Amino acid sequence: MKNLLKNVSFVILLLKMCLIFGQEVDVQRRIVIDVGHGGKDAGAIGVNGIQEKDVVLSIANAILKLNNELKKPLDIYLIRYSDTLISLSDRTKLAKALKADLFISLHCNHSDNPNARGIEVFVANSNSQYSEDATWLAFQSQAALNKELGFDSRGVKFANFQVLRGTIDYCPAVLIELGFLSNHDEGNFISENNNIEHIALSILSSIQKSIEL
């Protein structure tokens, strides 16, 4: 019954997204998704051995797949499409070269405390003309993930991460920590393909709401 309710929830969210994406968008804005880590940099390692670099790549590919199935897909690019390592400076350079209108960096969290859990979204702690839009996107992303997936909220925070610092001057930029792989429940949840689609659809929904501003 729990799985059935999950599937029904996903179908309802997908139908809502189809209605939203069916609306006219005057200007096609370019979204660049930074897929964290890669190659020899595995990122966080989960309690079940799952690697952060693989989780975020699966979510990014699910976002692309869902976007491509829409009647009017968005203009979305990934920083990496495979298990390769790209330096932080090159990630921001690529986003700039792609002329990103929106930059989203995907990560998963880790803690020595196995009870640590929840979503947190970061924006650059430096001010720019895009700071307000970035903060709005951060709240939208967290709200979507919390509402549709039931993830705990750890708040929107400000940080000096290089990928945010390097992009905030020319587009809204956020970094999303998609739960703790070190937490048994969240690590197992994010390992399931069906749940990855839920996460991807929630992120896609928050992107759409942001570009409608």
Image: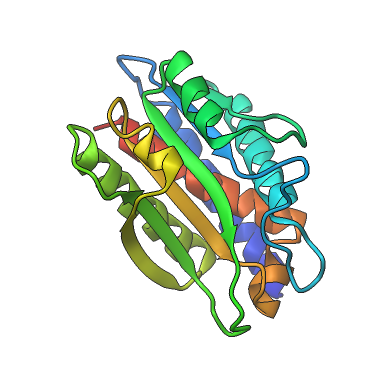
Q: Position of residue 35 (x, y in %)?
A: 60, 39
Q: Using the image as rendered, state which of residue 126 and residue 176 is in the foreground.
A: 126
Above or below, 62 against 157 in this view is: above
Tally of marks:
0
Q: Position of residue 164 (x, y in %)?
A: 39, 41
State the quadrant of the N terminus: bottom right
State the quadrant of the C terminus: top left
Q: Quadrant of residue 38?
A: top right
Q: Quadrant of residue 187?
A: bottom right
Q: Where is residue 43 in the image (x, y as percent from the top left)?
A: 67, 55
Determine if residue 11 is in view. no
Q: Using the image as rendered, state which of residue 201 and residue 95 is in the foreground.
A: 95
Q: Using the image as rendered, state which of residue 69 and residue 47 is in the foreground.
A: 47
Q: In the image, 14: left or right of 189?
A: left
Q: In the image, 92: left or right of 80?
A: left
Residue positioned 43% across, 33% down in the render: 103
Residue positioned 17% across, 32% down in the render: 129
Q: Position of residue 86 (x, y in %)?
A: 64, 32
**Residue most extreme to the right:** 49
Determine if residue 41 is in view. yes
Q: How was this image coloured?
A: rainbow
Above or below, 57 against 166 in this view is: below
Q: In the image, 169: left or right of 176?
A: left
Residue positioned 62% across, 25% down in the render: 68
Residue positioned 40% across, 56% down in the render: 121
